[in-house]
Image (tube, rainbow, N blue to C red):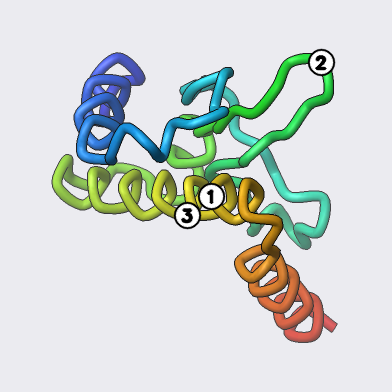
Amino acid sequence: MITIERVHEILDRIACELPEEFYRELNGGILLLPEAVESPDSEDGDLFIMGEYVEDPSMGRMIYIYYGSFVEVLGNIGEKELEEELRETLYHEFTHHMESLAGERGLEIEDERKLADYRRRKK
């Protein structure tokens, strides 16, 4: 797997692709964290959280990207493939941020629907 330092460089490059207005009220920024985060809904350790949009009353709004989850899920993929996965995850989390600012929940509802499908398949 590509090092966390290299992933940080790639993530910075992707973040620079986004318009400045996307960062409005994202006062905690984008944080690349080393851990793998298994979803509380995971069965058999097969579902990980790749990224997370966080709204904290005291810390504000931020996006977490979990390097360890990418390692667990994607293993030893090439840099180009990893960059696409990072881009997809970051854009997903920014969609949560933009919807939150607009008072919308469309992507959150879609994520809940996907989790419900996962739970049904695991029964």
Sequence-earlier tag: 1 or 2: 2
Give the quadrant of the N terminus: top left
Tell me the distance, in whole angstroms, between the alpha carbons under discs 3 and 2.
Answer: 24 Å
Asked if 31 appears above or below 50 in the picture, the reply is above
Q: Residues within 10 Å of mark 3 (few under 14, many from 20)?
A: some
Lateral position of residue 101 relative to residue 67, left or right: right
The answer to whether the residues at label 3 and label 1 have Cβ atoms under 8 Å apart is no
Of 83 and 57, the residue lying toward us: 57
Q: Nearer the viewer, mark 3 or mark 1?
A: 1
Q: Which mark is drawn over residue 9?
A: none
Asked if 60 appears above or below 11 in the picture, the reply is above
Q: Position of residue 37 (x, y in %)?
A: 66, 37
- The kind of residue tagged 2 is Ser
Residue at point 80%, 85% (across, down): 120
Sequence-earlier tag: 3 or 2: 2
Whether residue 19 is visible = yes
To which residue does mark 2 refer? 58
Residue at point 31%, 21% (across, down): 8
To which residue does mark 1 refer? 98
Tell me the distance, in whole angstroms, between the alpha carbons under discs 1 and 2.
Answer: 20 Å
Residue at point 41%, 40% (across, down): 22
